Image (spheres, rainbow, N blue to C red):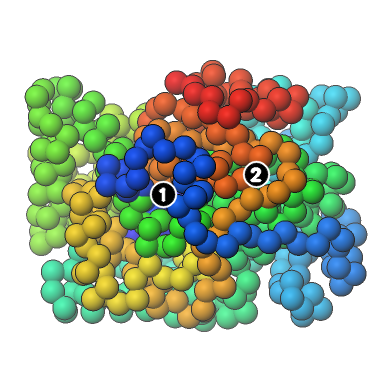
Amino acid sequence: MHTRRTLRRTRTGTAATRLAPLLAALLVTACSAQGPSSTAGPAAEEKRTAVPALVALPRSTPSALAPYYGQKLRWRDCGVPGFQCATMKAPLDYAEPSGGDVRLAVARKKATDPGRRLGSLLVNPGGPGGSAVGYLQQYAGIGYPAEVRARYDIVAVDPRGVARSEPVECLDGPKMDAYTQTDVTPDDGREADVLVDAYKRFADGCRADAPKLLRHVSTVEAARDMDILRAVLGDPKLTYVGASYGTFLGATYAGLFPDRTGRLVLDGAMDPSLPARRLNLEQTAGFETAFRSFAEDCVRRADCPLGGRGTTPARAGQTLKAFFDRLDTRPIPAGDSAGRQLTESLATTGVITAMYDEGAWQQLREALASAMRRNDGAALLTLSDSYYEREPSGGYSNLMSANAAVNCLDLPAAFASPQEVREGLPAFEKASPVFGESLAWASLNCAYWPVKPTGEPHRIKAQGAPPILVVGTTRDPATPYRWARSLAGQLSSGRLLTYDGDGHTAYGRGSSCVDSTINAYLLRGTAPADGKRCS
């Protein structure tokens, strides 16, 4: 089962985790061919968005927050060679700082050339719900370019409610297994009721686990936490690389604290001006765009189960959708020790997982061939499990729980009832004949959330901030390219860098043009001309 989320890219073993890869549940999509012309510039994108702008906070720090800004971190060994860890306190409620703390996990990898150190570089892999500490230890702290690691302490903080920072835990392993297998393409009222009940049980579990914290896991609060960390680390300005949802977090920081904003890289950008339904619809189209790119590659290869040479992407999509429909009534064996079979929901998730990185296309071809030709769903189930961060033991990370907690607080629900979903289905199915039905119903989950949303769509200007680098990939499935154009147009100092390619996000994905441009910005503050393109 999917739940509405913005998927992010992490680098923790699979290219898709997680954004997202993590890949986990759903979403937000680009109206692709049905949306505004792709030739419209950032200014046009901003003009069409008639929503208020995020208001910057006062430059002076309130006295009630002084103890948080003045705290000293006590660094200790993480148990991972070369990394240090600490715990930072932040107010649970910024409106009432004396009302209690939330404890946040922080980690760092110190600069390898301390004599030339520029400061701290904070990283976030997205989600919401992705562990920034895990991302640091498994990728950024060892995989970022050597020259960047030489000049910066690479730092991460798990946002409130995520991973090591007082995680929200909604369902245990067996209940999550049942939840992820729930049919998200209901054929009648009875099946729709079953789906609604699943969303309600998930929400009730979250409320029971974290009744107070659940009201205070918004992106605005996480951005304010980052400013405390900036101060505690001794940096006058924040230097930051955020991917997927991490771009929304970073842009929010810039909007709240433009005078404390340094070099920000927002890779795989979100558009904060869009309401939830539009976000989900546009992301749905983004996955269709990515699937068509995969299908064009697939049908040229002998092992493609979706057709041979000459098969159109549309026809390949029809074949895949027919396979999903068969699984809806007849799941197939998956060799799972817990007795799970490959259902339509899990198979759809498995395919979506591989859309995040073209490097996973071969794995997807083989998984589809195994399932469609040999009735063996094990490989697709493995892809689905990586999306949900399901462990071999049957446990799950708290990715899905945190994802829903943040998303449902940040924006009003995309749909309020099954009837609204049915009315919206034609638009979603037009955006993606393959994924539209599933993703439309997945967008219903926040309708039953136990906490009212505190956020609304808004533009982010960050007036007065230095150049902010916004990166967009032309065939990005999870954060459609037009979002990057829109965000770059909203930001008063936005610089758009375009990567003409496939997959989610661009930094560290093989383009020397992208990497050298971002490195020059981080190391020398040299921002590219707005509109630079790389391939």
Question: What is the three-letter code of the residue carrying label 2?
Answer: Ser
Residue at position x 20%, y 51% from top?
430
Label 1 crowding class (10 Å Cα cut-off): few <14, some 14-19, many 20+?
many
Residue 42 percent across, percent down from the top left = 50, 40
Residue at position x 74%, y 71% from top?
94
Label 2 crowding class (10 Å Cα cut-off): few <14, some 14-19, many 20+?
some
Q: How far is the residue under mark 2 from the one under mark 1?
A: 32 Å
Q: Nearer the viewer, mark 2 or mark 1?
A: 2
User: According to the image, label 2 marks what residue?
Assistant: 492
- Decide: is 147 above or below 459: above
- Decide: is 170 above or below 437: below
Q: Is residue 56 left or right of residue 404?
A: right
Q: Is residue 253 left or right of residue 451?
A: right
Residue at position x 14%, y 60% from top?
328
Residue 106 percent across, percent down from the top left = 72, 52
In-front residue for pair 67/141: 67
Residue 208 percent across, percent down from the top left = 52, 81
Q: Earlier in the sequence, mark 2 or mark 1?
A: 1
Q: Is residue 513 left or right of residue 521?
A: left
Residue 148 in view? no
Element marked by disc 2? loop
User: According to the image, label 1 marks what residue?
Assistant: 23
